[in-house]
Image (cartoon, rainbow, N blue to C red):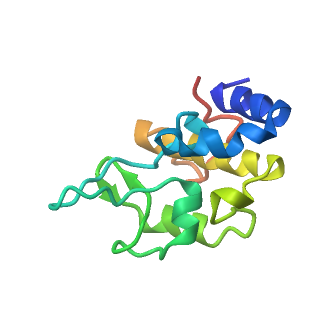
Amino acid sequence: MDKYDEQIAYLTEHPEDIRKAWCKNNGHLELFKTLGDDIDRFGNIDAGCVSQIKGYSYTSAGCGVFINGRFDEEFTKEIFNDPTVPEDVDFVTIESLPRFAYYQRKYDALVAGTVHEDDNDFHPDRDCYN
């Protein structure tokens, strides 16, 4: 069990806290943290959390995933095109929480540079970090 599993377990027991957890830092719980920390020349953060990315365009002009300061179009498109990801916090449910965990784990693995080169596929059972 990793930190995301623990957060899902907590929110499953306390679904009334989903919105509050999402709104705090847009990720007081790491389940909802921003996928990147890119800041443009005007001081704006272009990176977003999973639901923010889903709600915007998947172009570098919109809200996306940033890996080590660089826009990751493929990862951003994956989230944007995922029909199981809600685009608004008001539609985040207990059932959608595992998708947030999946994308957070994938992001963690990519930032750490641990994507397996053998098949270039992310495996949540192999690539989880506590």
Q: Quadrant of the N terminus?
A: top right
Is the residue 83 above or below the residue 94 in the image?
A: below
In the image, is 7 to the left or to the right of 35? Answer: right
- Residue 20 found in image quarter: top right
Q: Is residue 71 visible?
A: yes
- Residue nearer the viewer, 80 or 41: 41
- Residue nearer the viewer, 108 or 91: 91
Q: Position of residue 42 (x, y in %)?
A: 17, 61
Q: Residue at x 51, y 53 (%)?
A: 49
The image shows a total of numbered marks equal to: 0
Q: Residue at x 50, y 65 (%)?
A: 76
Q: Position of residue 98 (x, y in %)?
A: 75, 45
- Residue nearer the viewer, 29 or 19: 19
Is the residue 77 above or below the residue 25 in the image?
A: below
Is the residue 77 above or below the residue 69 in the image?
A: below
Q: Position of residue 33 (x, y in %)?
A: 51, 42
Q: Residue at x 58, y 27 (%)?
A: 129
In the image, is 90 to the left or to the right of 25? Answer: right
- Residue 30 found in image quarter: top right
Q: Is residue 123 visible?
A: no
Q: Position of residue 55 (x, y in %)?
A: 56, 70
Q: Quadrant of the C terminus?
A: top right
Q: Residue at x 84, y 30 (%)?
A: 13
